Image: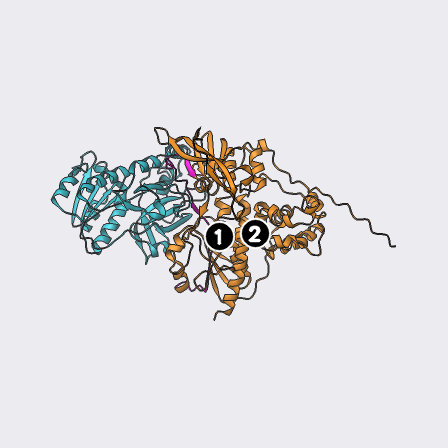
Amino acid sequence: MAETKPKPKLNKKAVEMRKQEPKVRAKNFSEVALGYNEAEALEEANRCLQCPKPQCISGCPVEVPIPAFIKCVREKKYAEGIATIKSKNALPAVCGRVCPQESQCQAKCIVGKMGEPISVGRLERFLADWECGNGFQLPAKAPSTGKKVAVIGAGPAGLTVAADLIQRGHEVTEFEALHIGGGVLSYGIPEFRLPKKIVQNEVNYVQKLGVDLRLGNLIGRTHTIPELMKEGGYDAVFIGSGAGLPQFTGCAGENLGGIYSANEFLIRVNLMKGFLFPDYDTPIRIGKHVVVIGGGNVAMDCARCSMRLGADVCLVYRRSRDELPARHEEIENAEEEGLVCKFLAAPLEFYGDERGWVKGMKCICMELTEPDAKGRRGVKIIPGSEFTMEVDTVIIAIGQTPNPIIQRTTEGLQSDPRHGTICVNDVGKTSLDGVYAGGDVATGAATVISAMGAGKRAAKAMHEYLTNKK
Amino acid sequence: MEVEAPDVAAKSQAGQFVIVVPKETGERVPLTICGYDAKKGTVSFAFHEVGKTTKELGCFGEGSELLNVTGPLGNPSEIKKFGKVLCVGGSIMIAPLLLQVKAMKAAGNQVTTVIGARTKDAMIMEKEANALSDKLYVATDDGSYGNKGLDFLKDLLKKEKFDHCVVMGPVVMMKEVSAITKPFNIPTVVTLTPIMIDGMGMCGVCRVTVGGKMMFACVDGPEFDGHQTDFDGLIQRQRQMLPEERLSSLVWETSGGCKCGRNKA
């Protein structure tokens, strides 16, 4: 009998990524996670089994060829590695940082069945940061098709569509309502999770591909979709305008000073750089006792920004810790930095002082009910369980819905009356010919990568539409 | 201030506003449009130099560049033939009011205009207002010119019947005029200018209660029914960031202003 080759011993532990110490980072806005160095990246890449039938790719909404780029890392062919990722994903520096890999590619990793899965996101980030330090390479473009496309919104979905379609030879104009590109990557996700320099690099990359980015251009007001298609001569339109409309609780006293929507708070801090006031002109006022209402990633971002601005923060969430929709890593980071949570509680009323500034809130305790058909547990009020909390700042992070301006100004565009989302089929086509939509505007608030996945599918369908259009 | 922004100018209508970002480290400031020329591709707006950003904007001379001008934002005014229209403007908002006066006249209305200011020296655009309106009244808070305060409106409304009223000015003035027109059942439209950041429905800082409902001035307005508007809530919300606004202004002035010499401390 032939001697069996000794199997290399699998290292079940992933290589940790270095982070700033909790006590230090809780006081600054610099990036928390420091990324792999070359030795760490090589060690982690060598854990990959290079499966002949890889499962990880099927876990990725944009189907990045994961084993192939990890092989490039092993062989130190970094330029080839980043090109491999960019064949499917135009924003690797962003995705390497903010994708929920634990529930996507890494959840499917074979190594993960025996130990910790391969750190796909950290390796992706390593390559993207390598490219940032070594100069960007532009991929080849298909010959011009003579077709014009308008992309609305320069967030994850819009940037993906723009980068994809321009490489397929179409002329792309991207309209962004804010004065800075990046969408939620710029206004929503904080500096310490996703440095704005990185976002700007990715936006610049899409511009270098040849996309004409027009800032401060709100479609629905500056131009409407029918105008773009008639007078503007655009052959197709993609709507990636996101979910920017904040939800409020409807509780009494919500208009008091010191009560921010998560959007207002994050826009002030991130987009307008309020944490650098007065060097930057937009102020952010924060008290000592901040309550954040909600339990998603946006709530975590608000809580962690507040701590960095010097406040004690309590998160009030109506379900329990197990139901928190935020990424695990973010919850752990926030708790390490000093976040206190009050689970199974919801606000009832806000009280103000004589100047109209919030000084307290009344809450009520909740209990979980049996899971519904989808497995999600509901909540019900425990009568008589009211309690009050002293607060001087409240941030309401209970969700965002799509902005209604485009729906109101585009005749024939079907949208869901309850959620305000634009109705699309499985490839992102709307009720109007040549008009596609994807990302949060079609699904309601979700993740960066799911928006990019929707962008990929829509871009493919739009390319087919444009190719067949006379 | 007149700026070149062809896309904005092409779509501007009375009642709308723009968001101006002067520079990279600057704020997003909402300013009501008080004129536009689609042919020239320009829009104009007026402002008092009260805070850091407006003082700084005041130093922008001919040929200067703003980082960004976004618009037109908000819903246009309802302009149609109402019959007899009363247009009341106060302080700097007289400038955009005159754009409405012009549009109301063009729609075939008979327009009576009232312009008010703190004191005689602060009165602006009287000549223009006179030329555009069928009848003009002026008023000052201290009585140094024209009528003292707005009480005379009550007598005017007793004598004359108006079908529609438009008010643009400081919140206290809009509140006062709305209270005066209410007993006469004159539909009264006020233009709200709360604190805004994005100006397109994202941040919710401009929320205001109208008819018991939460509205966003930027996308649901900026014009609302003056008889349904919670002005006191609005006044409170406008004061939210006053200490920061003062600090910003002070820091700017003590560090030498914009160095053009106009705003030296």
Q: Residue at x 28, y 41 (%)?
A: B229
Q: Chain of mark 2?
A: A
**Residue B183 image position (x, y, % from top left):** 18, 41
**To which residue does mark 2 refer?**
A91
Left/right placement of residue A108 relative to residue B24 reads right
Q: Which chain, by letter, is orange? A: A
Numbered range of the magenta stretch: A231-260
Q: Residue furthest bottom?
A: A470
Q: Amino acid at mark 1?
A: Thr
Q: Dots 2 and 1: beta carbons under 8 Å?
A: no
Q: Is residue B170 left or right of residue A240?
A: left
Lateral position of residue B64 relative to residue A86, left or right: left
Query: What amino acid is at disc 2?
Result: Leu
Distance from the alpha carbon under mark 2 to that under mark 1: 21 Å
Instruction: Mark 2 vs mark 1: give the one in front.
Output: 1
Q: Which mark is residue A443?
A: 1
Tag shown at residue A274: none
In the rendered structure, does residue A236 fall within the stretch colored magenta?
Answer: yes
The answer to whether A19 is drawn above or below residue B218 in the figure is above
Name the quadrant of the N terminus of chain A.
bottom right
**Considering only order in the chain, which callout, 1 or 2, is on the residue closer to the N terminus?**
2
